[in-house]
Amino acid sequence: MNTVAAVPFHIVSGFLGAGKTTLINRLLKAPELAGTLVIVNEFGEVGLDHWLYERLEGEVALLTSGCLCCSLRGDLVETLKTLFERRDSGALAPFSRVVIETSGLADPAPILHALIADPELSRRLSLAGIVTLVDAANGLATLEAHPEARRQLALADVISVSKRDLVGGVDALEARLDEINPAALRLERIMPLDFLRPSLIAPAAHRASRLAAHGAGARAYSLSHDVPLGEAALSRFFGALARLAGPKLLRVKGLVLTAGAPGRPLVVEGAQHVVHAPRRLAAWPFQPAETRLVAIVDGYTASEVGALWRALTDAPEIDRPDLAALLENPLARRGGGLFD
């Protein structure tokens, strides 16, 4: 049986008016992104009409850049399955990358979960990254007023502040972004090449063991450890985190240094209680080799996330149970490890 190479997909997120349309229009001009399938809500809403060259069958248009654009009016999962079927049969021009633009009020977590949870699409697609745009002029007010905007930021691999020319400075906004997602890569201007490299973990932007945030809400917590971890303990840790947080575990991602293969990092990528089958990279993309994980949770504090992490890494702490004690709690439901 032939193995079909997975197509990388990107999610472009951001609140209303953040500049998603402008970004996608600019990226589609780049020859490096020829062969990209862009999925949007409506053609007119994203301003791609001037790029249209030829309308294909159904709701798919061929753009002058060599990209395809699909108008999404139904279920995303079924739309993608249909597009893959047409691509496989030759009825649709081939595409080598998928960019999904969310609506300004959309929470990316259910989108990510749906694509990872579907057996067919989890085999055909591979998450390349979530890009979230923030409006420099209205960003702080939006984050305070709309929980959707905070979740968009917490789930991001890459954050870019748009419309900087409209304000005098963005220091206060940058500080707020740091509170919500300290692990995301910050880019002032997203270039086509930024879409061509994976953004699972941003080594330069990673703040080691950032668990200092107070209060609950959608946040990304950075976790790091330089001692190889056992895969069995790691599986129990993720299982415990999934059981305790449930649907509040929006996403988990990262590279793990394991005792069994320290020279090849284990890639972990999941949404809520569903995870892609862990895979190994041929080599570490950064040095020194160490575990770098990001857990994005909604409604849990740093102390609760940190308790599980310290139990996994055997960090000594007074009056704190180890991982085995946490898992032997009779109130905890058995099973559910991410590697099970």
Image (tube, rainbow, N blue to C red):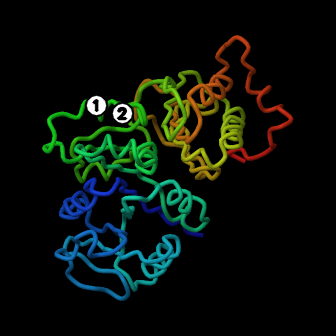
Residue extending farthest right: 330
Image quadrant where residue 118 sits = bottom right
The amino acid type of the residue labelled 2 equals: Arg
User: For residue 122, which numbered disc appears in the image?
Assistant: none
What residue is rendered at 49% in x and 37% in y?
219
What residue is rendered at 29% in x and 35% in y?
173
Within 10 Å of the Cα at label 1, are there few (<14), some (14-19), or many (20+) other Cα atoms? Answer: few
* Residue 268 in the figure: left or right of residue 205: right
Q: Is residue 323 above or below residue 9?
A: above
Q: Is residue 260 above or below residue 90?
A: above
Residue 145 at what x, y percent from top left?
40, 46
Spatial CA span between label 2 and label 1: 6 Å
Residue 4 at what x, y percent from top left?
51, 66
Q: Quadrant of the N terminus?
A: bottom right
Residue extending farthest bottom: 57
Label 1 residue SS: helix
Residue 2 at what x, y percent from top left?
55, 68
Label 2 residue SS: helix
Q: Closest to the observer: 167 or 198?
A: 167
Image quadrant where residue 216 sits = top right
Q: Are marks 2 and 1 in contact (CB under 8 Å)?
A: yes
Q: Closest to the observer: 307 or 139?
A: 139
User: For residue 176, which numbered disc appears in the image?
Assistant: 2
Q: Is residue 330 above or below residue 92?
A: above
What residue is rendered at 51% in x and 36% in y?
294
Q: Is residue 245 above or below residue 80?
A: above
Question: Where is mark 1, residue-wise?
Answer: 172
The amino acid type of the residue labelled 1 equals: Ala
* Residue 158 in the figure: left or right of residue 221: left
Q: Closest to the observer: 215 or 221?
A: 215
